[in-house]
Structure formats: structure tokens, C-alpha cells
Amino acid sequence: MQVATKNLELISPRAALMPCILDDDPAQLELLTQQIASLGFEAQATSDPEQALRLVKNGRSRLVLADVHMPEMNGYQFLERAIQADPGVHVILMSGDYTLESALDAIRKGAMDFLPKPVDRTRLKRILDDTAALHDQRRRVKALEEQLLKDLEFHGIVGKSPAMLEVFDFARKVARHYTNVLLTGPTGAGKELVARALHQISPVSHQKLAVCNCSALVDTLLESQLFGHMRGAFTGATDTRPGLFEYANGGTVFLDEIGETSLPMQAKLLRVIQNREIQRVGSPEVRQVNVRLIAATNRDLRAEVLAGRFREDLYYRLSSIQIRIPSLAERLEDVPLLVQYFLRKYNDAYGKNIAGLTRRAQALMLQHAWPGNVRELENVVSSASITATGDFIDIPDLPEQMQHRGGTPAGGRDDWRPLSLDEVRKQHIQRVLAMCKGNRLRAAQVLGIGRTSLYRYLKEDGFEQAAVRWTKSASAAAGA
């Protein structure tokens, strides 16, 4: 039935509207049906509220004119149930005892309008024409959005924000060259998708792409996974197996969460990058490999180097080409586009025909902090697609924690307050200095600025003397 509705939408906005008249008075039903027909619309008349609700649920009516005073279900009760069934439906209430207060109350409850009886033909014509035009406008906007989605999709990644367009542009440039790449960004931001895109548009796209999550394996298993092993090399090694570097020879190896690897494993990875050679576990033989390495991490590797947890030489080998994937909170303008992309995906997966989100659900989406980034958004759309019963996803279809945290600012913390950029800079410099125990040279490296710039900021912020005392006390403690 919904497929038939979509075909009608393509033919005529007036035919797509399919007004329904709900009234327990047969004379009013006949009069309004004739009036609406004379205005060029084909109306469906009924005195049964349940039948009108079925028409709404099945997508066979996008506009309902309902009488307020009905014996089985009054107009306000019908309005509430109709909006629950389809938040996008237009409901106009009618009554012989019209008052301004009752009209405003109906509109506050979600009615499109409140008309006095007998219904004025001129006003009815204007409402029908405006509703049909609005319905046609939404249809055309949806078609444009679908075309925009196709144009803005970059090898499975969707984005129109300046931050993401910059990522796409830089990825295109980098992919032409057979070089190592480091992807940074928070968990769930889409680093693996960018890695796959880099491989797909690279000169070795016809070769294999091997993926390994470094945080999921202990060192011994990770070494076997990457470099392979010989039969009998360790307990359980019943046969000889090549590793991912041999498997993807000539292609690409993607190492996710490389910041979780141990220092001994990092030394082995450095050898692969520098010498293009590996050794299987339990074998003295050195094998040559030619692979492109793409690494990803959600950690600040520069800080990890300063803390002694990551090899500096490996970091510089990896970070010669670095692409930062922004968090979803940094590109909220991409949320509607991503929602549409995931809706299309899960409509196909679940056999649904969900058209989109209600306006209040869209507003809640944009107020959410999205700590889980795009992965969290996809999970929200996936679960909402399962629970939604109408053509639109509404607030009750969203996770409970989102429903109760709609007013939380985009920092995710209840104690969040707006700060000026100067205040943010001051706080950040203090935290980095604390992490580096007052070592200003190391703090400047972490901050990515020159030592002179750091001194200037400290002097401007009134922290210069404090930093000097901190450095002296740290030196004295080290000498003791």
C-alpha cells in the first residue's frame, strides 16, 4: 500500500494528499466530501475513527479533517492516536462551538488547524492547497537529499561538513602514492572506513587489504597473526601459516589501534617499515614483503612517545602522512545526512519503508553529544528502525538515555559552561604542563608549538613564575 502511495506522489501532489473526513454526522460527511471534490481533491469519508486511523497507518491518507464531538472517540483523542501512528500526518479539527482558546489548545496538541462549522469553503480551499504544496515540497526536498547523498558519498563515507570534505580531498591526494599513513581520531569516528577508501583508490586497489585490530590480541598471538609462524613454534602451532604481511604482499595492511602495541612489537613493525622484511615465528629465514601500511589510533601518539610508551622512530615513520578524522560533535551538520544514509541501509536490511525522523526527533539528535561518534549514531538509527511502527522515527523510538538527555550540551557533561578561546588555551596549557611535570620543552612538543611561543603564553597568562618554580622543584626532586 505504501508503494502505491509513493507512485501517486510522483503523479500528483493533490492525489497524494488523499484527505479523509471523519464525522459521525452523515449530512456533514456528504457535504464536506462534495466540497473537497469540487476543489479538485478525492476525499475518503468515514464515521469510524478506527478506520480513519488505519488509513493513516497504511499511508493512504496524509490529511484528516476530524469532528471534535464524536461518541466513540473525540477529536482530541483521535489527534493523539493519529500523531502516534504517523507524526507526519496533518490533522484538522472541526467544531460547531469554536472558540479561540479551543483552537489554540488544539494547535498546541499537534493539530494543523481548528475550523468552525459550517466550514468556510474559501478557508478550506486555502488549507488544502497549502497542505498539498507542503507535501509536494517535502517530496521534492527528499528527492534532492537522496541525490545529494549520492554525490557526497566517498567510498562508503558520508559527509558534507568542511572538516570531512577536507579529509576526502587529502585522502584522494595521499592515495595516489604508495606510502604509509597514520589515521587519528576518536573511537567510532570512521578510521577503518577511511583506511578502506585509501586502499580502494590507491594504485594497488586490485591487491589484497588485510585488517588487524592490535588491541584485540596479546603480543604472542599478534606476532603470529602479522608475521606468521612455523609448525611447532609454540604450543598449538600444528601447521605452518603465513601472516598478514605475506598475505597482503603487494597490497595494504591496516593496523587498527596501533597505540595499544607493546614496545617489542613496535620494534618488529619498525623493521617491516624500514627494511621491508619479516620473519615468521620460529623461523630464521628473512622474507621480503612490499606492503603499504595504514595505522590508526585514538591515542595522542606524541604524548605516548614523551611518556615512553611508544617508540619515537616508529612514530615519525608513521606520521609523515597523518589524517585526522573529526569526531561527530565537530561536524554536527553531517548528522541529517548520516541519518538518511543509515535509514536507507536499514530499510533494506529490515524490509522497512521509514521516510525519516520527526522534527522533534531531529532536534534531539542535534542536541546529543555523540560520545560514540558515527558508530553510536548508526546503532541508534538501526535500533529505531526496528522499533518504529510508522513512516517516521519519533522520540519514543530513540534510546531512553537520549530521551532524558536532550538538553545536555554538546560537551556531554552537566557542568559544562561556555569558555572563551583564551580560557580554553590557559586550561589546556596548564594540563599539559602538569602532565610533563613542568618540563616546558616537552610541553611545547606536546602542544605542537615552539618553546618561545609557550613562554609568551605563560607570561601573558601570568604563569611564568609558577612554571619556573615548578621546574626547579621537579629538578630538585630528581636530584634527591
Image (cartoon, rainbow, N blue to C red):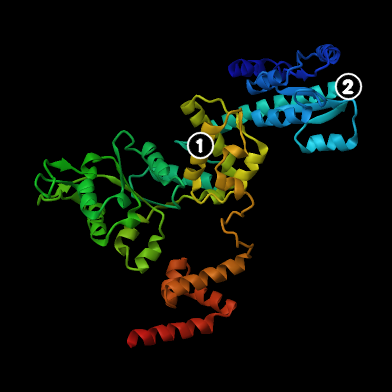
Element type where label 1 sits in the image:
helix
- Determine whether 425 is above or below 50 in the image: below
Q: Residue at x 86, y 12 (%)?
A: 27
Mark linked to residue 383: 1
Mark 2 crowdedness (10 Å alpha carbons): few <14, some 14-19, many ≥20? some
- The residue sitting at 80% across, 19% down in the picture is 23
Q: In the image, is 188 to the left or to the right of 242?
A: right
Check disc 2 and report its element: helix, strand or loop.
loop
Q: Taking 43 as reference, is 160 above or below it?
A: below
Q: Position of residue 40 (x, y in %)?
A: 80, 13
Q: Quadrant of the C terminus?
A: bottom left
Decide: is 165 above or below 20: below
The residue that mark 2 highlights is: 119
Q: Are the two marked residues, 1 and 2, in contact with CB atoms closer than 8 angstroms?
A: no
Q: Is residue 414 visible?
A: yes
* Separation of residues labelled 1 and 2 (CA atoms): 43 Å
Left or right? Give the position of 174 relative to 23.
left
For the residue marked with disc 1, what is the amino acid? Answer: Ser
Type of the residue with mark 2:
Val
In this view of the protein, can residue 129 be seen by the observer? Answer: no
Q: Residue at x 76, y 27 (%)?
A: 91
Return the residue nearer the eye: 31 or 41. 31
